[in-house]
Structure formats: structure tokens, C-alpha cells
Image (cartoon, helix red, strand yellow):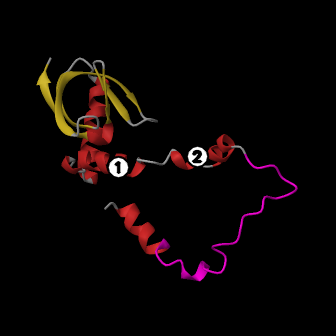
């Protein structure tokens, strides 16, 4: 049985405190018309957007288990290397970075093209990489 059903059983199993009102017939309000079924469902639609969100977070977390987070010194080294590559964009480099999509480290060979500081991304050839995901930059040649 799933977790939701177990919680429902714990909460709603004991209905003895409601025995005095269980058999009272429902009386419709005189001032208001009954709400349409579609309108009633629309009230709870925003909560429906959260359905399955927990599973998505767990799936993404599984992708990040292989990521090794950089120290401050490693990040400063990457910053200095990128600053150097800005002055020498003709240099061919091998970039080892964590790919958010695949959940694995990948290598990219190319030349420095651009850096978007606001978005925290560095572009090598046509590939944009998140700067904090860069683990190592090696010089390959010209």
C-alpha cells in the first residue's frame, strides 16, 4: 500500500466522534445555487500542478549524485584560466565539465568563445557550459 493510503487510514479510520451527525440529511443552502462540478474542480487545479513534483526532484537528485563540488581554490583557478583564455581565444582547450542533462562528466575540446557572467555560463565553440560545473581546463594546443 502506498504512503498516501497509509496516512489516510491513520487519519480517517476512527469516525466514532462523528456518529451524532452521520445520519443527518444534507440541506441545500437557500441563498446560493450549488456550484458547478467544473468550477469546483477549478478551485483545486493549482494543487494538481504539484502532483508528481516530488518524483521529479528525486529523479534529478539521482543525476547529481555523481557530481563533485569544487572547492573555492578550484573555482578561483577556473576563473583565472577563463580570464587567460579571454586574452588568447585561439588556444585549443579540453574542458572537463559536469553535464546537467546526462548527469555525467564529459569532455569538450574547443576554443573559448564567450562568457555570460550574469548567467554564470562559458561558451566554447557552440557549447555553453555552466561555469561552476567546470572541473578542469587543460591546454591542448593551437
**Residue highlighted by disc 1:** 55
Q: Which residues are magenta?
A: 12-35
* SS label for mark 2: helix
Left or right: 108, with 7 as reference point: left
Q: Residue at x 58, y 82 (%)?
A: 17
Q: Residue at x 55, y 50 (%)?
A: 47
Left or right: 19, with 13 as reference point: right
Occupied quadrant, residue 25:
bottom right
Cα–Cα span, label 2 and label 1: 18 Å
Left or right: 22, with 73 as reference point: right
Q: Is residue 136 on the magenta stretch? A: no
Q: Earlier in the sequence, mark 2 or mark 1?
A: 2
Residue 73 picture location, percent across and down: 25, 51
Occupied quadrant, residue 16:
bottom right
Residue 125 picture location, percent across and down: 27, 18
Q: Residue at x 22, y 51 (%)?
A: 65
Q: Is residue 137 visible?
A: no
Residue 113 picture location, percent across and down: 32, 20
**Residue highlighted by disc 2:** 46
Amino acid at each position: 500500500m502506498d504512503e498516501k493510503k497509509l496516512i489516510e487510514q491513520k487519519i480517517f479510520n476512527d469516525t466514532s466522534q462523528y456518529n451524532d451527525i452521520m445520519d443527518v440529511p444534507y440541506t441545500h443552502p437557500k441563498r446560493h445555487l450549488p456550484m458547478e462540478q467544473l468550477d469546483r474542480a477549478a478551485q483545486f487545479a493549482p494543487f494538481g500542478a504539484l502532483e508528481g513534483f516530488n518524483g521529479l526532484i528525486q529523479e534529478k537528485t539521482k543525476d547529481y549524485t555523481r557530481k563533485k563540488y569544487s572547492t573555492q581554490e578550484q573555482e578561483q583557478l577556473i576563473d583565472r584560466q577563463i580570464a587567460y583564455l579571454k586574452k588568447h581565444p585561439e588556444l585549443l582547450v579540453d574542458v572537463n565539465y559536469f553535464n546537467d542533462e546526462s548527469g555525467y562528466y564529459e569532455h569538450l575540446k574547443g576554443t573559448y568563445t564567450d562568457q555570460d557572467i550574469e548567467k554564470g555560463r562559458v561558451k566554447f565553440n557552440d557549447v555553453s557550459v555552466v561555469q561552476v560545473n567546470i572541473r578542469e581546463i587543460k591546454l591542448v594546443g593551437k
